């Protein structure tokens, strides 16, 4: 893409791709999200799980419509989603009609996982080192799923931080890893309420971020038993909830 750099002048730049994805169940549209194309089936599965559905799978629809994915969700009740969702790339809960619409039920996490503070402090750097698209565009969020020893199991990038999380959770669902009771999620930006919600639904006991958490994110993490680590940079870690999981 052509760009004018001041004071250098005309140049060529690489930007992140953003396109709509329509998620269907039984041929009926139930959500539209603005996302970076790729791993769309994982995105649909992660979205469904975070909405409290019990998906069996996801696939390209029979009509091969572009930017569309079909969820297999046996027992899906259309009345539960009485209106269509519109999810922006920046905030997965924007446009929700009421707080109850985002209060997805998730059992409190009872995992006894403990992780060394030094390892937690290293995760954002490990995440960034594995972000090829961010390196090219500077415009993508990332979520990484790590083992308790720091090994990277899955990384997904997207223009939407919630989409990146959904893609990782959808991957874990396909691999039979849910709940994520012995694993760690790390995100490249700030910690929103919705990211904590998605981690809790996935059963992940430890959520790490480079940025700051919101007050509602901390409140939800405390309620669901998630260890929340923010401002993880320069060897430092701020632990907001369930600090006993972080070994010093």
Image (cartoon, rainbow, N blue to C red):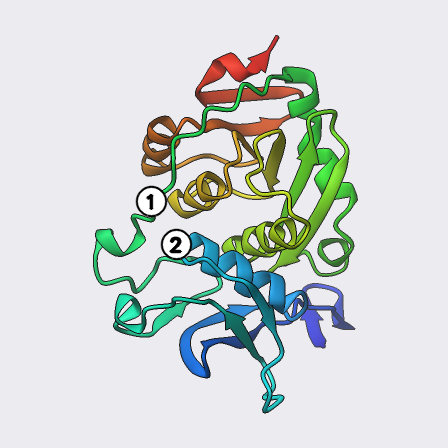
Q: Quadrant of residue 149?
A: top right
Mark 1 = which residue? Answer: 105
Vertical placement of residue 64 versus 134, above or below: below
Q: Is residue 10 left or right of residue 50?
A: right
Looking at the image, can residue 234 be seen? no
Looking at the image, can residue 214 be seen? yes
Residue drawn at x 53%, y 53% is 161
Residue drawn at x 45%, y 43% is 201
Task: Report the number of discs.
Answer: 2
Q: Nearer the viewer, residue 33 or 2?
A: 33
Q: Is residue 61 left or right of residue 28?
A: right
Circle 1 residues within 10 Å: few <14, some 14–19, many ≥20: few
Mark 2 = which residue? Answer: 52
Give the alpha-carbon distance from disc 2 to disc 1, as whole Å: 7 Å
Q: Nearer the viewer, residue 128 or 102?
A: 102
Circle 2 residues within 10 Å: few <14, some 14–19, many ≥20: some
Residue at the limit of the structure toward the front, as seen here: 75
Residue at the limit of the structure toward the top, as seen here: 248
Vertical placement of residue 28 versus 40, above or below: below
Vertical placement of residue 27 versus 44, above or below: below
Circle 2/circle 1 CB separation < 8 Å = yes
Residue at the limit of the structure toward the bottom, as seen here: 63
Q: Position of residue 128 (x, y in %)?
A: 72, 42
In which quadrant is the C terminus drawn?
top right
Q: Position of residue 86 (x, y in %)?
A: 38, 71
Q: Nearer the viewer, residue 124 or 234?
A: 124
Residue drawn at x 39%, y 56% is 51
Give the SS element for disc 2: loop
In which quadrant is the N terminus drawn?
bottom right
Q: Is residue 162 left or right of residue 177?
A: left
């Amino acid at each position: 893409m052509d760009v004018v750099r001041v004071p250098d002048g005309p140049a060529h730049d690489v930007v992140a791709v953003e396109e709509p994805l329509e998620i269907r169940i039984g041929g009926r549209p139930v959500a539209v999200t603005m996302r970076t194309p790729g791993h769309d089936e994982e995105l649909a599965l992660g979205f469904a799980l975070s909405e409290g559905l019990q998906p069996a799978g996801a696939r390209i629809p029979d009509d091969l419509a572009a930017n569309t994915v079909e969820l297999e969700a046996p027992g899906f009740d259309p009345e539960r989603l009485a209106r269509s969702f519109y999810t922006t790339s920046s905030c997965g809960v924007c446009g929700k009609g009421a707080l109850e619409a985002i209060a997805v039920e998730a059992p409190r996490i009872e995992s006894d996982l403990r992780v060394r503070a030094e390892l937690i402090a290293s995760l954002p750097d490990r995440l960034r080192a594995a972000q090829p698209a961010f390196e090219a565009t500077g415009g993508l969020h990332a979520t990484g799923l790590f083992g308790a020893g720091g090994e990277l199991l899955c990384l997904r990038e997207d223009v939407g931080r919630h989409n990146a999380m959904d893609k990782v959770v959808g991957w874990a669902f396909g691999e039979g890893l849910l709940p994520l009771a012995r694993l760690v999620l790390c995100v490249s930006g700030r910690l929103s309420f919705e990211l904590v919600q998605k981690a809790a639904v996935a059963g992940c006991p430890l959520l790490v971020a480079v940025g700051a958490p919101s007050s509602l994110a901390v409140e939800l993490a405390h309620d669901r038993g998630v260890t929340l680590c923010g401002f993880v940079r320069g060897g430092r870690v701020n632990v907001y909830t369930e600090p006993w999981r972080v070994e010093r």
